[in-house]
Image (cartoon, grey):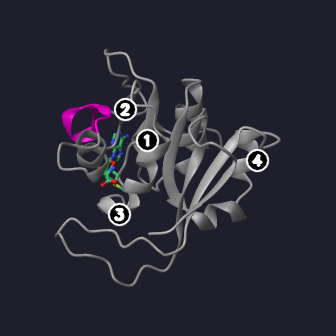
Amino acid sequence: MSNKQIPQEVLYSPGANDEQKTPAYAVLPLVKYIDKSKVVWCPFDDETSEFVKVFRDNGIKVIFSHIKYGQDFYKYEPKESWDYIISNSPFTNKKGIFERALSFNKPFLLLMPATWFNDSALSKLFGDGSEMQTLFFNRRIKFTNEEGVVQNKITFASCFIGKGILPRQIVFEKI
Ligand SMILES: C[S@@+](CC[C@H](N)C(=O)[O-])C[C@H]1O[C@@H](n2cnc3c(N)ncnc32)[C@H](O)[C@@H]1O
């Protein structure tokens, strides 16, 4: 089913695992790849997000937005000028989120389960793959849930997937 066929209430309905917060150690490795003259838009984030905090602490300009402020990624774009999208998005409707990210035709990186490589969606989104970039970690990321509890039994590896930010198509980072 294409996005156009999915009823809007399904597109925007939250998934059971959507409220997982990313730890700072998974954001820090990105800092060295970000041109300091660029503005990063974090579209799934508030001021407590480690994407926002780590980037700002490292001199990177950040704009953030979040569904709780009525800023729905599928419809919203900041009025301010921005250069990159970087965040951990909900894992619900990954393909729709990537279609939206690609529609801006700007560099982006989104944290995804590495198991997504088993899916045909990536080839549909990135064509021959020549533009696609991935950053893999040597360890699984332990996210924090809504209650502030670190999830110690993470069953999947995560990686950043996107285009136009990393110096090569595949990057490995130790955390
Ligand atoms: C996996 S969490 C990650 C939060 C934060 N980016 C981080 O890494 O700590 C995804 C967040 O996106 C929010 N969200 C869900 N759907 C959204 C939408 N359509 N537009 C903007 N934010 C959305 C969720 O409420 C959730 O807080």
Residue appearing at x 55%, y 31% in the figure = 107
The amino acid sitting under disc 2 is Trp
Q: Report the Cα–Cα distance between label 4 and label 1.
A: 21 Å
Which segment did they paint magenta? 59-71
- For residue 86, the mark is 1
Q: Report the Cα–Cα distance between label 1 and label 2.
A: 6 Å
Across and down, in percent, residue 104 comes to: 54, 23
Q: Which of the two marks, 2 or 4, is nearer to us in this view? A: 2
Q: Report the Cα–Cα distance between label 1 and label 3.
A: 15 Å
Circle 1 Cα neighbour tier, 10 Å, few/some/many (<14 / 14–19 / ≥20): many
Residue appearing at x 34%, y 83% in the figure = 152
Q: Earlier in the sequence, mark 1 or mark 3?
A: 3
* Residue located farthest toward the right when viewing the structure as drawn: 128
Residue at disc 1, secondary structure = strand
Residue at disc 3, secondary structure = helix
**Residue highlighted by disc 2:** 41
- For residue 25, the mark is 3
Q: Which of the two marks, 4 or 1, is nearer to us in this view? A: 1
Q: Earlier in the sequence, mark 3 or mark 2?
A: 3
The amino acid sitting under disc 4 is Ser
Q: Report the Cα–Cα distance between label 2 and label 4.
A: 25 Å
User: Which is nearer the eye, 16 or 113?
Assistant: 113
Q: Earlier in the sequence, mark 3 or mark 4?
A: 3
Query: Is residue 109 one of those drawn in magenta?
Result: no
Is any part of residue 173 visible from this angle? yes
Mark 1 residue's CB less than 8 Å from ligand 1:
no
Is any part of residue 21 visible from this angle? no
